Image (tube, helix red, strand yellow):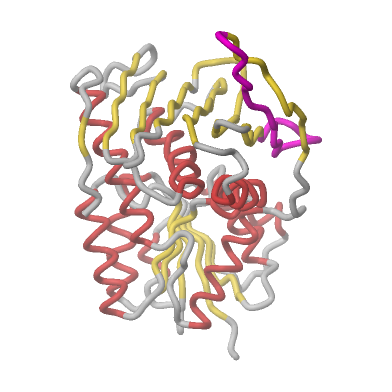
Amino acid sequence: MTNIKLAVIGAGRWGVHLVRNFLTHPQVDLVAVVDPSIEKLADVKQRFHLDENILLTTQWESIKNISELTAVAIATPANTHYQLIHYFLQHGCHVLAEKPLTLDPEECRQLCQISEYQQLILMVDHTYLFHPAVEKGQQVVQSGQLGDLRYGYATRTHLGPVRQDVDALWDLAIHDIAIFNTWLGMLPVKVEAKGTVWLQEKPKLSDLVWVTLTYPNHFQAYIHLCWLNTDKQRRLAVVGSQGSVIFDEMSVTSPLTLIHGEFSRQGDLFIPINQSQEVLEIEKTEPLGKVCDQFVNCIINKTPSLISSGWVGRELVEILSALTKSLQENGQPIKISNG
């Protein structure tokens, strides 16, 4: 089979990783890199020793006429996604888009429908869904090892990067929401959010956000998000009646831990029993590499991604939009139909 001719649009913090992965992919020919910054293009060329036949351009329109362009990977600001994805789907290209798919659920729906009509792959780079610890955690939660599920919690904090196109909610929450949805195998039916703004009043972009997700089985997940916090944390847990599973991305030795324990009632007392801790072995692989592999395989096999299709991206944007409404209404609960 002829290699897939692919262009990467956006050579910023995340785009360079897409360039690295697709440049070395055996079934891909990287034919172009687009970024409005000449300096970033020069850096990419030097860093990866790009061949002279790879087009480097500041204008995405310049790649329109590349012969047999098959696919694009888009890593641009979220507010540019709709225009770019719409154009390339309409002109016969498969699309891998950085999260979020767009900033509007209806736009997401339109793009998903166009991709289906055109028989093209539309996939969203929800990288955490390809993380070996998330995949293993899903098995643990859905196996029943934790007993009756009680609640979940997550913290995603760091000192930057501070974005100017979306707030901390849209930048950070999507990861943890995607993981909770995957581990539970369901979507929330009600959401709540409260936020605080310190850095950017115009436009008003929350630096700190507290999120509550309520699922159909009354399970609730609580998420703490902040890009103005020197205490860097990337931690998520699901708690059950017989134990907890914890995904701690900052732990080099044990990113995924299963902690067993439950209560034995003795009269009016609750005595902890069966306590033990188990570090779960996970595959050593780069999640983004698995994203790129699946995108290529989806194109070759002409089948949409079962993990991170455009429709999965739309579901997450629907949830974020409801959370934004709650944020604007100072934490009022917002119901989601997930239709």
The quarter of the rendered structure image containing the N terminus is bottom right
Q: Which contiguous range is marked in magenta?
A: 249-268
In the rendered image, the residue lying farthest to the top is 268
Q: Position of residue 191 (x, y in %)?
A: 29, 32
Q: Position of residue 271 (x, y in %)?
A: 66, 15
Viewer-proximal residue among 51 and 175 = 175
In the rendered image, the residue lying farthest to the bottom is 1
Viewer-proximal residue among 64 and 200 = 200
Q: Position of residue 151 (x, y in %)?
A: 47, 30
**In the rendered image, the vertical position of residue 140 relative to residue 19, given as above or below:** above
Total of numbered circles in the picture?
0
The image quarter containing residue 2 is: bottom right
Residue at 39% across / 15% down in the picture?
199
Q: Is residue 86 magenta?
A: no
Viewer-proximal residue among 175 and 257 = 257
The quarter of the rendered structure image containing the C terminus is bottom left
The image quarter containing residue 292 is: bottom right
In the rendered image, the residue lying farthest to the right is 253
Q: Is residue 250 magenta?
A: yes
Residue 196 as seen in the image, left or right of residue 10: left
Residue 17 as seen in the image, left or right of residue 213: right
Residue at 43% across / 31% down in the picture?
221
In the rendered image, the residue lying farthest to the front is 267
